[in-house]
Amino acid sequence: MFKKTLMAAAFALALPSLASAGQHDLDTAEGVAKVMRKIQCSLNDGEAVTYWWKGRAFGRRMGMSDKYLFDVEGMNVRHCGTVRDEDGNYGYVLRTREILLYKDKRTGEVLKTWENPYTGEEVEVVHVDNDPVNSGPSFGMGRDGKAMKFPAEMLNGRWWMTSAVPLYYTNVLSGDYQKYIGGQYRATEMFNFMGDTESLLDEDVAKPNVQIGWVRHSDWLPWMEMAGRDGIIYMHTAGLKLKSWDDMPDGIKKEIAANYPKYTNPPPLDDDRENETSWTFYKKLMESRGGPEPLKREFPF
């Protein structure tokens, strides 16, 4: 969910030089890379950082009012490592894994099954279990090889940054003829990051406080079994970078201990596996069960 958001905002407005004694110089590629890294994780190689967020999920179909479907709660545990390019320029890599839990909107309990209000069928819930979600290396430079502009606004001791990431690619659950009949995954991820300017720019602060907002609208989740029906699902959440993993609410910590124990720590810094998504994970799950169930055939007479 967060792997592409920060370095992708190349549309940012230019900011005046903010460098002073003991502060990162945002007019240099290294200064920008270090500040972006501080938002993502920590300046200390291998120091684990946890982001946590929660909110609601809604469904939208043409000609109907939106439906409040369920709650969502997620976390991402991550760390960064320093790298240098062939010219010695400073950069970093990001290694993470993340979960997103779908929860009953009345009780707050983690869902095992869910009654789909559009189909009337009870379906098995498959939570997000993405390991890894990695990115980098990032060097604080644009495509022209020059220092990129820090993609944020600053005012009255605060900074904030927004990024929208439209996604459109072949859905791994589709067949070989998606060019002709469709079968692409379409979504947009929208992020807000914000915090105080002093800790962000201070060279002596390795891990500043950061608050986040995350919105995603996308095709229906595969486990909802919507079978091509029109409409989308969208999620609206907010959260923050925690001081430590243990600062997460007890409920999600208990769920991780019971079902996702590896999520207490990020992947190793030398992890070179392909990234996991909700769709690739679901495909692997179905294949481990012998493949997907065939679509029920319906006849008009």
Image (cartoon, grey):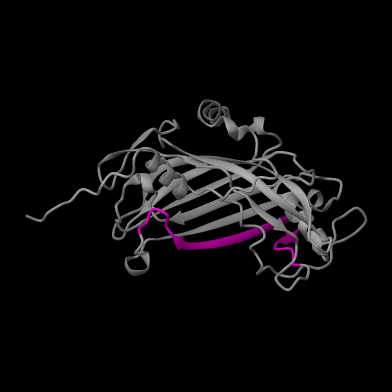
Horizontally, is 132 left or right of 83 in the view?
Answer: left
Q: Nearer the viewer, residue 57 or 82?
A: 82
Which residue: 58% across, 40% down? 75
Residue 275 image point, x, y percent = 56, 50
Horizontally, residue 52 falls left or right of residue 297, namely: right
Q: Is residue 203 above or below residue 8?
A: above
Task: Indicate left or right for 110 with 176 as reference.
Answer: right
Expressed as whole percent of the image width and height from the top left, the position of residue 35 reads 77, 55
Quick one: 257 or 288, which is closer to the camera?
A: 288
Image-quadrant location for residue 209: top right
**Residue 157 appearing in the image:** no
Q: Residue visible at 76% across and 44% down?
A: 207
Identify the residue shown where x is 59% and y is 33%: 262
Residue 16: within the magenta? no
Tell me which corner region of the image, top left, top right, bottom left or bottom right, holds residue 142: bottom right
Q: Quadrant of residue 42?
A: top right
Q: Picture coordinates of residue 194 (x, y %)?
A: 68, 52
Task: Point out the residue furthest to the bottom here.
Answer: 144
- Quarter of the image for the C terminus: give it: bottom left
x and y percentages locating residue 223 in the rendered image: 36, 44
Q: Which residues are magenta?
A: 148-175
In this orientation, does residue 261 appear?
A: yes
Residue at figure coordinates x 24%, y 49% from the top left: 295
